[in-house]
């Protein structure tokens, strides 16, 4: 009986971690974006890199930039429902996205996924959006 309880305890402790330990593949993120574009799926895609990295290019369909250090505060400002809304985070390699995913889970967000990184995105043959230059006050373009 004691071994039986320990087995269930181990399963309960480690099973949730295994469900969310893997990153979404670039192909999965692309399919989700396509489904979202056809109103068949809803999720928020967040770039958790720095503003400087984001300015070099980002995944088309990205909803917002929130550097991973500010992810919980930034997501709370978006007024997302921790129990209902789905969030996908990505960065350059997937590492910071993993930290952001864990921080959001620790804050009570239940449907958070690590979308990996733009390196895998590019390696899979997808492209990045290049931000358009903004017009400065004097009429000159700025990156």
Image: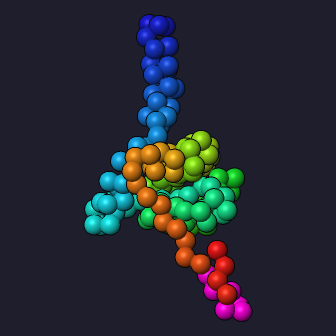
Which contiguous range is marked in magenta? Answer: 134-139
Residue drawn where x is 43% and y is 65% of the image: 61
Q: Quadrant of residue 140?
A: bottom right
Most foreground residue, 87 or 93: 93
> Was residue 18 drawn as part of the magenta stretch in this picture?
no
Most foreground residue, 115 or 133: 133
Residue drawn where x is 56% and y is 58% of the image: 47
Q: Quadrant of the N terminus?
A: top left
Point out the residue furthest to the bottom here.
Answer: 138
Say left or right for 63 vs 28.
right
Count all numbered tags in the image, as a single digit. Answer: 0
Say left or right for 28 vs 8.
left
* x and y, in percent, of residue 107 in the image: 61, 49
* x and y, in percent, of residue 52 in the image: 67, 62
* x and y, in percent, of residue 59 in the image: 47, 60
Say left or right for 106 vs 129.
right
């Amino acid at each position: 009986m004691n071994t039986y309880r320990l087995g269930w305890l181990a399963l309960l402790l480690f099973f949730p971690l295994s469900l969310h330990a893997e990153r979404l593949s670039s192909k999965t993120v692309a399919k989700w974006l396509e489904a979202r574009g056809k109103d068949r799926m809803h999720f928020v895609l967040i770039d958790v890199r720095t503003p400087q990295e984001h300015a070099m290019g980002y995944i088309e369909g990205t909803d917002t930039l929130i550097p991973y250090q500010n992810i919980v505060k930034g997501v709370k400002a978006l007024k997302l429902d921790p129990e209902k809304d789905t969030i996908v985070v990505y960065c350059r390699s997937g590492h910071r996205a993993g930290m952001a995913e864990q921080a959001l889970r620790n804050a009570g967000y239940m449907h958070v996924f690590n979308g990996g990184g733009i390196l895998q995105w590019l390696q899979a043959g997808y492209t990045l959006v290049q931000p358009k230059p903004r017009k400065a006050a004097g009429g000159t373009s700025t990156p």
